[in-house]
Amino acid sequence: MSFFARVRNMIFRPVAEWRVVGQEGIPTKTLFFQYVVPMALVPAIASFFGYGLVGADGIHFRVSGLFWGSAMAIDNFITSLAVFWFGSLIVNALSPGFGASRDAGRSARLMAYAYTPAWIAGLFYFVPSLQELVVLGLYSVYLFYLGIPVLKPMPDDQRLSYAIVIAILVIIIRFLVGLLIVNLIYFISGNPYLPYAPSLF
C-alpha cells in the first residue's frame, strides 16, 4: 500500500482500509519513519509558511517572520511525534481495562492511522486566518472508533468509552507538549514579539 493511497483510503474508505491494516504486520519503526514522520511534516511545513510568510494578526501584534514560522513548525512537528509515541503507549496500556489485549504494534498502528485526519487538517495552517478549521481533525476520533474492532478487539459496549478516553488524553498530551515546546523555544531564543506571554520558566 503506497503512502498516498493509505492516506486517501483512511479518509474516504476507513472501514475497508482498517481491514487491510489489520492484515498487515508493519514494524513500528517502519511505520514511524514511512508514515508518521511524513504526516507530521504536513502541519509543520504549513505552519512555517503560514506564520513565517503569510502571517497572522494577534491582539497587540502581528505574528510573522522567520522566528514565528520556525517556532510554529518545530512546535507542530515535535508535538505530532510526541502525540504518536505517548498516544500509542496509552492506547496499549489502557487496553486491558476495556477488555482488549496489549499489543504494542497494533496500538501504534491504531494511533498512527487514526490520527491521519488531524495531520491533514494541519494544512489549514497555510492560511492562519483559517486555522480554527483544524478542528475538522476530530474526525480522527471516529476513525479510531472504527479501527478498534480490527486492531484492539473488545466488547462492543466498551468501544465508545475507550475511544472517548483516548481522545481526551491525546488532546491533553498535545496541549501540554505544545505548551512546553513553545516555552522552551522562548526560553532558549527569547520572545521578541510577545514579551508579556505567560511562561513556564
Image (cartoon, helix red, strand yellow):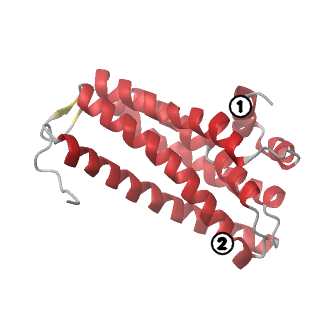
Residue type indicated by callout 1: Arg
Tell which residue pokes out farthest to the top in this image: 53
Tell which residue pokes out farthest to the bottom in this image: 97
In the rendered view, tell whether residue 170 sits above or below residue 32: below
- Label 1 crowd bin: few (<14), some (14–19), many (20+), radius 10 Å: some
Q: Which quarter of the rendered picture does the N terminus lie within?
A: top right
Tell which residue pokes out farthest to the right in this image: 23
- Contact (Cβ within 8 Å) of mark 1 with mark 2: no
Residue at horizontal 14 percent and vertical 43 percent from the top: 194
- Report helix, strand or loop for mark 1: helix
Residue 107, position in %: x, y?
A: 71, 58
Q: How many marks?
A: 2
Residue at horizontal 45 percent and vertical 44 percent from the top: 78
Q: Would you say residue 161 is visible in this rendering?
A: no
Give the left or right position of residue 41, taking residue 148 as reference.
left
In the rendered view, tell whether residue 195 sits above or below residue 68: below
Q: Which quarter of the rendered picture does the C terminus lie within?
A: bottom left
**For discs 1 and 2, the disc positioned in front in the rendered view:** 2
Residue type indicated by callout 2: Leu
Q: Which residue is mark 2?
A: 94
The mark found on residue 159 in the picture is none
* Distance from Cα at disc 1 to Cα at disc 2: 29 Å
Residue 139, position in %: x, y?
A: 61, 47
Give the left or right position of residue 184, taking residue 113 as reference.
left
Residue at horizontal 82 percent and vertical 73 percent from the top: 155
- Report helix, strand or loop for mark 2: helix
Q: Which residue is mark 1?
A: 8
In the rendered view, tell whether residue 38 sits above or below residue 196: above
Give the left or right position of residue 116, taking residue 181 as reference.
right
Residue 83, position in %: x, y?
A: 52, 53
